[in-house]
């Protein structure tokens, strides 16, 4: 995902106040230990989450609360026409437990 320039503090502020019902939805759908990192040179956001099952947070995009969150974040991130964050799938090249 990519953050718009100058929006780091606003992004951090919004996530510090994540809606409880959105956080519960993620947990109820097997998403846990969710961390988002920012590369300040490129404004690229990199999210890492543990998942129980095959769903990730991005798979919940048809739900109204997720669509509201995307709309809430659209002014500070690069988004698709439906307000979902523009994402780039990455290939796992190493993993260690």
Image (tube, rainbow, N blue to C red):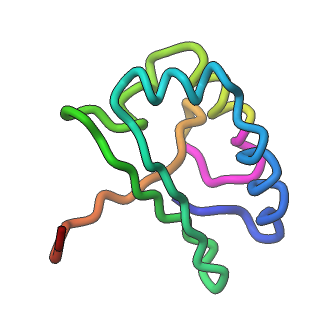
Asked if residue 83 is positioned above or below residue 97 in the image, the reply reads above
What is the chief secondary structure element of the magenta stretch? Answer: loop
Extreme-front residue of the structure: 97
Count of marks, rendered view: 0
Instruction: Judge by depth and name the residue closer to the eye, 61 or 21.
Output: 21
Asked if residue 91 is positioned above or below residue 14 in the image, the reply reads below
Q: Position of residue 27 (x, y in %)?
A: 45, 28
Q: Position of residue 94 (x, y in %)?
A: 16, 76
In magenta stretch: residue 33: no
Q: Position of residue 93 (x, y in %)?
A: 16, 75
Instruction: Judge by depth and name the residue closer to the eye, 56 or 43.
Output: 56
Position of 91 compared to 50: left or right? left
In magenta stretch: residue 78: yes
Task: Report the quarter where the C terminus lies.
Answer: bottom left
Q: Quadrant of residue 71?
A: top right
Magenta span covers which residues? 73-79
Q: Residue at x 44, y 18 (%)?
A: 62
Q: Residue at x 20, y 66 (%)?
A: 91
Position of 89 compared to 26: left or right? left
């Amino acid at each position: 995902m990519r953050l718009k320039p100058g929006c780091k503090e606003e992004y951090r502020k919004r996530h510090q106040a994540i809606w409880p019902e959105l956080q519960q939805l993620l947990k109820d759908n097997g998403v846990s230990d969710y961390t988002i990192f920012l590369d300040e040179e490129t404004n690229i956001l990199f999210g890492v989450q543990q998942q129980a099952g095959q769903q990730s947070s991005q798979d919940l995009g048809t739900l109204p609360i997720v669509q509201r969150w995307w709309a809430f974040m659209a002014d500070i991130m690069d988004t698709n026409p439906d307000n979902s964050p523009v994402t780039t799938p990455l290939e796992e090249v190493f993993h260690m437990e």
